[in-house]
Amino acid sequence: MDCNMFRELLSSYLDESLDEDRWRSFRRHLRECASCRKYALSEDPSLLFAAAPEPVVLQADVEACAAAVTAGIRRQRLARRLQRRRRPWLAAAAAIMIVIAGGLFWKVTLGGDGGSSAPGIEASVEGNVEMAPPTVEVEMAGEEVRIYQFAAEDDSGTAVYFIVNPAMEL
Amino acid sequence: MTDRGWVRSAQDGDEEAFAQLVRRHSGGLHRAVARILADDAEAWDVVQMAFLKAWQRLDRYDSRYSFSTWLYRIGTNLAIDLLRSRSSRERTHKAHTEHHLRLVGTGEGAGSSTDRAEADRILNQIVGVLTPQQRSAFVLREMQGLDTAEVAEVLGCSATTVRNHIFQARKALRREVRARFPEYLPASERR
């Protein structure tokens, strides 16, 4: 592109109406020709930004970026792996919570000793329902404990077990 | 190897292939983001975030499009989000404290690194008058030299919208340069 052509195309460049090839030729000339650059900047100072050459990026910065990104990827992978390992613990914790909640529920509704168990006790007294005797009692030889199993005769699917140390019985 | 080859390997979990993409594109993305944010150091953080996001979403990358365009889209969106979260007070303060100038860009040595630094410094001071979209369109097209169609793809808008953003940006920048940097006016117009 010569200087005359450059000056002719200046307004088209500013209007964004040049095709891509001419647009690139115009920019190349703007950067290479000092007199045309001076003319163009006097016409429109916003061309200062098109006239500026591309900044140089240091290779060290690029390598540092690549290292940081790779480290980030490894952290993400490790975090995902740890998350997967944590899941069985979460399941176990959830199971323990369910057992505790079930125990509390049983204590409250079927006659535990706590203060909040009063409604459960009253209900069983008013209904003259007696607790079923233990159906199974097992001495654990060598373990110094005794196991009681409470279960209704008509419900073989439900049972409550107590492990008792006879030395501590009143 | 082409970008497409590196991307395929990276999609199979190859970290080194992805590192090659970082080496190839981080410089260009950094230049664009640094000019959009007017902050060189913060731009490297955004570039790293953009690559990590790209890694997480590699399975969603559509190979019909250029990897660099897709990457620029992620990086530009992060930069725009960051710009929106910044307070205008902070930007104004920075613009006033950095106000010191030299006349360059018109001599025989124009087009040098000094001119580039000066253009970046002036842009950093006046870019606050542009909206994030105008700023991104202007930087990608006028300073980075991307095609209009590519800028439209990066910004997720039409080519006409890109031209309009650039037209409005140029108008605002011309006004700001004339008001704040009279050195760039022809001698006949200086007071």
Image: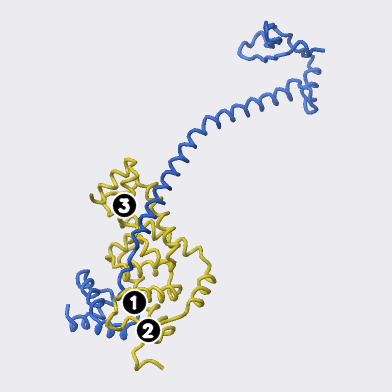
Chain colours: A blue, B yellow
Task: Tell me if residue B180 comes above or below residue B32 in the rendering.
Answer: below
**In the rendered structure, which amino acid carries the disc numbered 3?**
Leu
Which residue is tagged 2?
B103
**Residue A24 on image: x %, y %:** 23, 71
Q: As rendered, which of B68 and A104 lies closer to the eye?
A: B68
Which residue is tagged 1?
B115
How many dots with numbers?
A: 3
The reply to whether discs 2 and 3 touch (Cβ–Cβ < 8 Å) is no
The disc, 3 or 1, on the residue closer to the chain's N-terminal end is 3
Residue B21 is labelled as 3
Residue plotted at (73% across, 20% down):
A110
Q: As rendered, which of B71 and B158 lies closer to the eye?
A: B71
Quarter holding the N terminus of chain A is: bottom left
**Residue B14 on image: x %, y %:** 33, 42
**In the rendered structure, which amino acid carries the disc numbered 2?**
Leu
10 Å crowding of disc 3: few (<14), some (14-19), many (20+): many
Which structural element holds mark 1?
A: helix
Disc 2: host chain: B
Label 2 to label 3: alpha-carbon separation: 39 Å
Label 3 to label 1: alpha-carbon separation: 30 Å
The answer as to whether the residues below labels 2 and 1 share one chain is yes
Task: Tell me if residue B146 comes above or below residue A91 in the rendering.
Answer: below
The disc, 2 or 1, on the residue closer to the chain's N-terminal end is 2
Disc 1: host chain: B
Name the residue furthest front: A60
Residue plotted at (34% across, 77% down):
B115
The disc, 2 or 3, on the residue closer to the chain's N-terminal end is 3
